[in-house]
Every structure is written in C-alpha cells, then in structure tokens.
Amino acid sequence: MRRGRAIVCATVLEILGEPLVLLVTVASVAIAALAPAMHYHQFGDPSRMARDAGLSALLLGGAATAFSGTVRTFRREMETGTAQAALAHSVSRTAFFLWKFAGCAVSYSLFAAIMSLVSLIVVRGAEIGGAIAAEKGDVARLWGPSLAFAVAVAVVPLVASAALNRFARFRFVLVANVISLVVAAIGAMYDFDPALAGRLVPAFMLAASPALVIVAAAAAFAVRFKANAASSLVAIVAACMLPLLGNYCLSDALADGGRVPWMYIVAALAALLPAIVAPLAVGVAFINGQDVQ
C-alpha cells in the first residue's frame, strides 16, 4: 500500500508539472470566465451562458488534460526505465499499472475541481448580475467581484509562481497548478451560495466523469504504443464517445433553479463503469505481456 501511495503521489506531481497541463488549465479557466462576460446573448437566463461555458471548458479542457498527461507520464515511465525500477521493488505489473492510472485520475480530478469552482464563481456572478440588471432595468452581465475572482484564477497563479520560481526556485508549473486550485477555492467561498453549489457540483461531477474513460484508454494504449500512436487511438475512443456526451452534459436541467437528480447521476456513472474497466483490463494485459525496458 505504501508503494502504491508513492506511485500515485509521484504521478500526480509529474502530471501537475507538465507545461501542457498548465496551458490547458489557464485556457479553460479563461473560457469559463470570459465567455459569460460577453453578455449580449442571455436567452432569458442570465446564468445560462456561464453554465454552458463552464461545462464546455470542462469537457474540452478535461479531454485534453486527461489524454495528454496520461500518455506522457506512462510513456516516460516505459522509455526511461523508471517503470523497471518500480517493478524491482516488489510491485506487481498489474498493481503498478493500476496505481499509475489512479494517479492520472487524481490529477484529472484536480483539473475538474478547478473548473467546477470557477464555474461556481461565474454562475454566481451571473445570477447576481442578472438580479442587479432586473432591478435597474439594465442588460444582465457578470457581477464585478465574481469576474475578478474568475480572472484571478488564471492570472494570479502565473504571477505568483513566477515570483516563487525566481526567488525561491520553486517549480513554476507545479506551483501554478496548485495555486490555481487555492485561488478558485477562495473565490468560490466569497459570497458562497450553498443552494447553488448543491445544484451545480453534482452536474459538473457528472460532466467530468466521461474523461475517466479517456484516462483509462490513454493508460492502456501508452503501455503498448509510442506516444503518437497512443494519442491517435485515444482520439478515436474520444470520437466514439461524442454521441454519448449529451447524457452527461445536462446544462438545460439546471435552468430555472433545476438540478440533475441523484438517481440519474448514479445510473449514469454505473453505465460508465464498463467503459472504464474494459481499457484497464486491456492495459493490464499489455503490461503483463511485454518486457518493460
């Protein structure tokens, strides 16, 4: 168990130190924060644009983070000999593969948490902005403090981590990713609305879950194939999932104070389990059937 925790922690730190992961996170946060600020299309619901932008950023950014981080960390293990070193310490190949997958899943979960918190900030700001606009007879737009916090999630980590890297030699990318989560949590707590969180968080959990299929597929293919081939195969898996995403991205269910029923969430997650387990089984077969360099 101790070896397993070490593998998970090392994988999380490795993925959070990937520049591409930070780039995707910053871009996704920017989309979620700034798209609702273009307040010219409200469709009668001031927070709809905020919800849609957050879900879209989570789906697109999550898919990019899931496959890129997973493929790169697995290929690095296989090609640099670190996998062989880990297997030399009484860790079975199956356990090594599954612990690495767990680390990749945790890393993706941190990205999903950042995006969920940013969306909570922006949707809250859209609701307050809509209420102020209705009172003043103006056009609904984002509430200033919420917009400031959302933008800060993208900007503050870069500035702070740059300073820490310059004066204390902290790892720039890793620290920036961690600070993004901290700033997002602080922003979400400002003028926190428990009822809104109770509606949004389960819906974003549901929207984040299909990317775990991509993580599992990326882990399986990266064990057997080079990075380019593994990425191409993961892209095919992602394309096959597109028709199913409508069952997990339920923005309309949140309109007018609505929520996604917990029974639906449980059923949708249960339906997703075979699609996660199947590539994991393939990955276990791959890693047990080849020589680890």
Image (cartoon, rainbow, N blue to C red):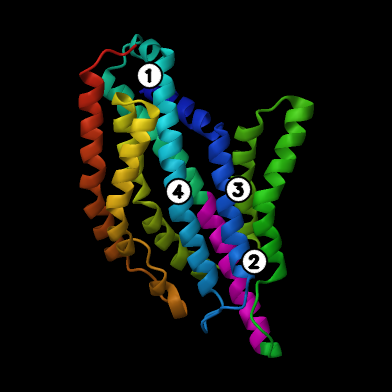
Image: 11 above or below 116: above
> Which is nearer the eye, 212 or 187?
212
Q: Is residue 192 visible?
A: no
Q: Which residue lies under the disc numbered 1?
A: 78
Total label count? 4
Q: Earlier in the sequence, mark 4 or mark 2?
A: 4
The dot on residue 191 is 2
Confirm or deny contact between disc 3 and disc 4 (CB under 8 A): no
Q: Which residues are magenta?
A: 114-134
Circle 3: residue type: Val
Residue 123 forms part of the magenta stretch? yes
Residue 230 forms part of the magenta stretch? no
The dot on residue 26 is 3
* Residue at image coords 66%, 61%: 190
**Residue 86 percent across, percent down from the top left:** 38, 14
The CA distance from mark 3 to mark 2 is: 23 Å
> Which is nearer the eye, 223 or 116?
223
Element type where label 1 sits in the image: helix
Image: 105 above or below 79: below
Confirm or deny contact between disc 3 and disc 2 (CB under 8 A): no
| Name of the residue lying farthest toward the right | 167
Circle 4: residue type: Gly
The CA distance from mark 4 to mark 2 is: 27 Å
Image: 148 above or below 105: below
Q: Which residue lies under the disc numbered 4?
A: 62
The CA distance from mark 3 to mark 1 is: 29 Å
Mark 4 or mark 2: which is in front?
4
The CA distance from mark 3 to mark 4 is: 12 Å
Quadrant in the rendering for residue 94: top left
Quadrant in the rendering for residue 32: bottom right
* Residue at image coords 54%, 37%: 20
**How packed is label 4: few (under 14 Cα within 10 Å), some, or many (20 or more)?**
many
